[in-house]
Image (spheres, rainbow, N blue to C red):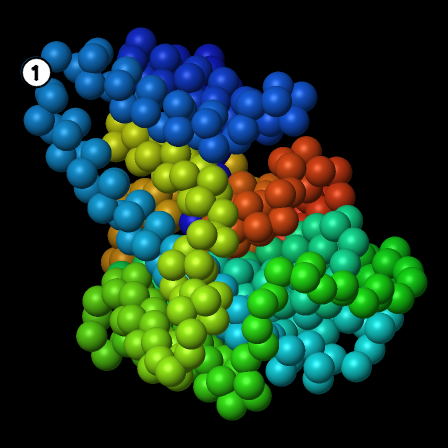
Amino acid sequence: MHGFAGFPLPVFHLLCGTMELLIIVVFTLGYLAITLEHPLRINKSASALLTGVLVWTIWILMSPGEAEAVDLALSHHLSAAAEILFFLLAAMTIVELMDAHDGFSIITSAIRTRDKSRLLWIICILSFFLSAVLDNLTTTIVMVSLVRKVLQKQEDRMLFAGMIVISTNAGGAWSPIGDVTTTMLWIGGQISAANIIQTVFLPSVVCMVIPLLVASRRMKGTVEPVTESGERVTIATQRERNTVFIFGLGALLFVPVFKTVTHLPPFMGILFGLGALWAVVEFIHRRKHDDQKEYYSVSRALQRIDTQSVLFFLGILLAIGALESTHLLEHLAKLMDEKVGNITAIVTGIGILSAIVDNVPLVAASMGMYDLTQYPMDDFLWEYMAYCAGTGGSILIIGSAAGVAAMGMEKISFLWYVRRISLYALLGYLAGAAVYVFLRG
């Protein structure tokens, strides 16, 4: 999932009434409040929640006689948001349980290099391929947690987290289960699994490698060892550590398998995995004293999760849902079709816009605009859209679920990301797009 910002108001004024225009103004102001979190000294979660509630309030108050329809639309979007939030909570809890058992030391001990540039390459390549198997959100949570075990300086961790966002979004774009928009196109019959892997893999690699080349050349020095906080009151045995790490990683990897077999939403698979890991943790610590068991418990893991970022995500999803239900995004898609006309330019623009406007409704609107009879399965339009919608969100920190997760975990500000990462992401996005267009002729 990716983010939004204001579109030129005079254009929307021609398309929309007073209610729609007011919704756009409120959303734009809310978006500005989020981006200016530090100067305003107002937490971005508060701004997101206010924005999400206000746009729905405007809609229902200015639509007499449509209260039932608004309620139904809100219920629909709340259900979709809940799926993502439950997935996020469960994935974070699994990662915290693995961390409590020092499970990531299995990976960190295998990483011998202390050179920051080499370490960045290793982390990003791991993120790229892991994202294709899991998804970009889960992979970001896992890899940012891993980086915390390797890097001590906050600035270094933020840079690595930004590059992880680029890598996981690129890795998810070429896999039918790696990004929600690619999955939508796959399920809708617009793309086939084998073909999307074959045609979008190389552009996705370029999308990751170009920013990585630039960033790694500027990254000098060696890694400073992480010092223990002293919070740990007990140490898991090697058997306990390995057991929880294997079950935790298995729970994450099981999600796409569960979805493919049952056709249930991914959050059901991650909840199943959390339940299984929870039972395993309770079993292996059943003979320990309560104080020791508490350190490894799910309740403690939940306390360590950054719930502010979850509430921020909820506010953003609610606000985007209102934009979709009031057909503002559909108007935008049609406007682009009428004014631009060129499919390559339109889809490239959709990718850039997906850094600001949620890519899920953008792709959904595009799927409704273009018919399969005109653009059959595996057409240029659908494959290019999978790449652009999947990778364009990296340009801004709130442009993807991976970015939002990294933002919450490492306290990355919107403006810091714009200054330090956005240009890298844009270069990678455009380079990958050029490669795809060239290869398709």
What residue do we see at 41% from left, 55% from top?
302
Query: Does residue 100 appear in the picture of this structure?
Result: yes
Q: Identify the secondary structure beneath mark 1.
A: loop
In the rendered structure, the answer to whether residue 374 lies left or right of residue 136 reads left
In the rendered image, residue 332, in percent from the top left (x then y), is placed at: 40, 31
In the rendered structure, the answer to whether residue 207 lies left or right of residue 131 reads right
Q: Amino acid at mark 1?
A: Gly
In the rendered structure, the answer to whether residue 159 lies left or right of residue 368 reads right
In the rendered structure, the answer to whether residue 38 lies left or right of residue 242 reads right
Residue furthest to the bottom = 239
In the figure, 389 relative to 192: above or below?
A: above
In the rendered image, residue 109, in percent from the top left (x then y), is placed at: 71, 82
Question: How many other residues sit within 10 Å of disc 1, few (<14), some (14-19) or many (≥20)?
Answer: few
Residue toward you, 99 or 358? 99
In the figure, 68 relative to 307: above or below?
A: above
* Residue position for label 1: 65
